[in-house]
Image: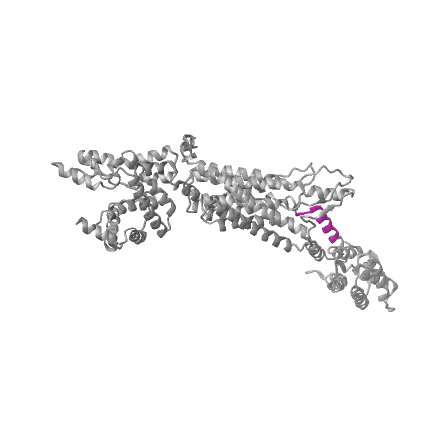
Amino acid sequence: MEKRSPIDQMKWWRKVKDHRYVRAILFFILGAILYLMMLGNVIPETMDVKLSSVAESDIRSPITVENKIATEEKRKEAIEEISPVYEQKSEYAQTQVEKINDIFEVIRLVNQEQEQPESGDEAVQSVTFEEKLEHVQEVISSGTSNDISDETIGTLLEASQSQLQIAQEATANAVYEVMSTKIAINDLDEAQQSVEDKIIIPTVSSSMYEAMIELARFAIIPNYIYNDAATEELRQEAVEAVEPVMIREGQLLVHEGETINHEVYEQLRIVGILDETVNIYPYLGLALFVILIIGVLAYYLNEAKTSVKNNNSHLLMYTLVFFVALAVMKITSLIEHLDYQAIGFIVPIAVGSMLLAMLISERVALFTGIIFAVCGSVIFNNEAVGTFNFTYGIYILFSSFAGVFFLGKSNRMSRILQAGFFVSIINMITVLALLLMKSGQYSLLDLGIHLGIAFLSGFLAAVLTLGLMPFFEAGFGILSTTKLIELSNPNQPLLRKILTETPGTYHHSVVVGNLAEAACEAIGAHGLLARVGAYYHDLGKTKRPHFFIENQMKMENPHDKISPQLSKTIIISHPYDGAEMLREYKMPKEIIDIAEQHHGTTLLKFFYHKANQESDQEIPESQFRYPGPKAQTKEAAIVGIADCVEAAVRSISKPTPDKIELMVRKIITDRLEDGQFNECDLTLKELNAIVTSMCETLKGTFHSRIEYPEDAKEKGDQK
């Protein structure tokens, strides 16, 4: 049966995967999926409720919002409760006394002016009484809107100086005494009448007495008046003291069976429960929320040192895993509507984080687990009154983290099942903690149901992970630990081909695998990948096995009969023949790269020197170099070093640790000086660690052995 090609080998994807906008499109698709998954949980539930109808069930507010109409009514009531502020103007008494004194002073001045002659004329000016009266009336009326009767002014004009003095003092004293008390506008008439009792002077004529009373009443004005600024200040303070009338999230608006009156109907309208209400804010809010999530996610994935940063195929895979996790949460949230107790805790969300940990990296899985928790708190808000249900958010967070922490870098089947069990235990502890923190009264049966469903969640997560893992591995060419272990099985067709057709090459590859794996683990690289890559790195030798010395079992070397140029062509072709065969078998790209790059652009020294010896002129090295490419990864470079080291050390007669180390260092130094490590990120410190690791491994391979007696006797006989 033909193997299915991974997506990287599909023509349509290879055309678009490196397009400049493909990452933006993938993030947009991820955002659209998020938006659609959470949209139904954000839009407030509406009801067909009519005024004066009977509520079919309890109705609670889904949001916290201010009831502005009720708040305004409370403010009006607060303003109405503030009484007007009045203030007694004590300075008015002195002002009105001065006004009385001014009137008497005007009378005196008018009388004096008539008695004084004009300048340059000794005759006394003759002025009629009417003119005096008119002049006084004009002066008095200029500062007030009230008038004093002509009789009163006439009486004052005709009075003597002594009578005016007595009248002035008595009237001023009476006005001051009355004006010293509070006189409101409503009390003005009473105050003006009371001034008559204050003027008791028997020595003046009745006409003068009446004139004094009229002048006193004229001077009495209200001195207890309304203070607009103080009143407004008190009212403003009262308004600011009024707390806004809030409709709280979860507040019971109407009980089942109650009649919906105008007040309740208005509250339902404010919180957006009525069908007639169209509110676009939840749509906009969710859009902004999704943009924030995608923005943070895009930044993290672009900064994280993982394959998702540059490999759009892995970003597509990440999007699919994210979709699977969201779909699992959404389906579980829909099951919640069946009203089964605690059914929401069955959500196997750990499948998302476990898949990401195995397919991409643990850090990405942990960060995405936080995103799952945030999204899950929205998706599982069916039982919550508000937008977020943090009970499920916390549950999802710990479940996701548990899967990543216990699974680690291993994805063997047994390890995945163990991780599922560990997730179940963490789920149970989390649920128990959440239930106890609510201080609810739960029976043992209720607790058992909750814990049993939480335990089942971890089991389902492990089963889903095991079921989905092969699809992602095959579809995206992911080289997981499970896949590598599968490829290292000697029963694999290509390994069996190497074993049966080139047994010497197979043994060589096994030793190279041991060297490469130990060296990779010494510097923190992927040891298992290096081992499996080493198993397949010389697959191309199966095309012409007898042209490679390890497969020449006591037979004549065919290179002795052909030219160095032809030998060079045969030897140099084996990495690329092997890579082509690996592509035909749909092998992972990492294995193909190791096979193609393990020789880099090194020089085929033996045949190069042989060709120079047979030629009359110097042959350029470029004709006897591998065409490359040079090693692009640490694993490919280390396999190339191990390949050369294994062959070189085997050629040493009587190998000792010093000889082995000297040979290994020489090989690595030659490759370093030849620029073979220029395109991978190996450091000098790592190269030194590789030397140490390979020497330790080779000491175990080429250790000295004791000579048995039988062997010694046989050697003596042979001699």
> Can you give x and y, in whole percent of width and height, for residue 166 in the image?
81, 68
First to last magenta residue range: 64-78
Total number of numbered discs in the rendering: 0
Colour mode?
A: one colour
Q: Nearer the viewer, residue 182 or 298?
A: 298
Does residue 6 lie above or below 656 as drawn? above
Residue 307 found in image quarter = top left
Residue 545 found in image quarter = top left
Does residue 692 lie above or below 471 as drawn? below
Q: Can residue 299 be seen at all in this image of the molecule?
A: no
Was residue 74 drawn as part of the magenta stretch in this picture?
yes
Q: Main secondary structure of the magenta part?
A: helix
Q: Can residue 509 be seen at all in this image of the molecule?
A: yes
> Can you give x and y, in whole percent of width and height, for residue 442 in the image?
68, 53
> Can you give x and y, in whole percent of width and height, for residue 268 in the image?
71, 42
> Can you give x and y, in whole percent of width and height, for residue 573 in the image?
27, 35
